[in-house]
Amino acid sequence: MKIIAIIGGTGMLGAPVAKQLQQQGYTVRIINRDSAKAKKMLGDNYQYAQADIFDPVRLKTALQGCQGIHINLTGNSKQSYYQNHVIGTKNILAAVKGSQIKLISMISTASAYPENDFRHDTKYKLQAEQLLKDSGIPYLVFLPSWFMETLALFEQNGKIVQIGKSSQKIHWQSAAEYAVIVAQAYANTEQFNRRITIFGPQGLTMTQALQSYAEHHNLKMQSMSTFMARLFAWITRDQDLRDAADLLQYYERVGEKNVADTLRTKTNLQNWLLQ
């Protein structure tokens, strides 16, 4: 493989993968709707192609010449999750039909199992995964637990706001170490056609992780019930907050699923905060 396209390569989890693949000698092509903005964010070390996953013609052009594709898509509602995960994956597969694609990978979640598909994000990620499996193209599905980088998203007006109950242990990991695992999997064909579960080295509840983050940054902690978060989201029409409240309640219910071949990153939260 020489050229790997990343769809969703400018965000919190896509950019580290792009960087790691580029450092390992691949030519990385960033596919997004605004190439000028993407280049301003990531720099000159990448190829850029402007396309939308819902524009089949431009998407096909953008993916020409690529041997690998990493899909890093998300959403914040039933409709956006379906469109991005299911329709987006269908469009990507249609765009590369008959080409010489050697691998398509996607980021999923450590909770992506049929018994947990009552959350739309999980349901549609599972459907996207099945589309990859049915395509006949070699695939990889990454199932990471929570990322330490997401802790910053809980900061509001100088406080860390915890939503809902917190009893499940979460094995927090860094995006950089996740990216290393992705790049290593691309380089090893024996890893193809499998799900790769990725956990961090240390299990901490959401409360414990947020408290550590708050203490390190000299921030106060504030708690909010799931009901109040949803009510506030409804009043303010904040779909991101509504989805976050749903996700936290969901994860408190299902937790992580440890499997025999789970890969472990090395950096714990305390050391990550000191970086």
Image (cartoon, helix red, strand yellow):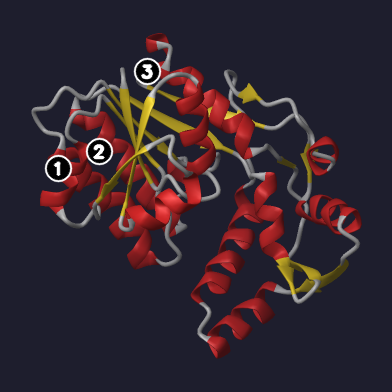
Packing grade of label 3 (10 A; few <14, some 14-19, many >=20) is many
Task: Give the x, y percent position of residue 11.
Answer: 50, 51
Task: Give the x, y percent position of residue 176.
Answer: 62, 34
Q: Judging from the image, what secondary structure is the residue with disc 1 in?
A: helix
Mark 2 and 1 residues: CB-CB less than 8 Å, in contact? no
Task: Give the x, y percent position of residue 215.
Answer: 91, 56
**Which image quadrant for residue 6?**
top left
Q: Nearer the viewer, residue 164 or 150?
A: 150
Left or right: 228 as drawn, with respect to 4: right
Task: Give the x, y percent position of residue 166.
Answer: 76, 57
Query: What is the CA distance from the residue labelled 2 to the residue labelled 1?
Result: 21 Å
Q: Nearer the viewer, residue 114 or 162?
A: 162
User: Would residue 109 be visible to someone looking at this image?
Assistant: no
Q: Judging from the image, what secondary structure is the residue with disc 3 in?
A: loop
Name the residue at 61% across, 39% down.
Answer: 175
Which mark is in front, 2 or 1?
1
**First in sequence: mark 3 or mark 1?**
1
Name the residue at 42% across, 60% down.
Answer: 75
Q: The disc labelled 2 sits on which kind of residue?
A: Leu
Q: Judging from the image, what secondary structure is the residue with disc 2 in?
A: helix
Q: The disc labelled 3 sits on which kind of residue?
A: Phe
88 up-or-down from 228: above or below: above
Marking on residue 192: 3
Marking on residue 131: 2
Query: What is the CA distance from the residue labelled 2 to the residue labelled 3?
Result: 16 Å
Residue under label 1: 61
Q: The disc labelled 1 sits on which kind of residue?
A: Thr
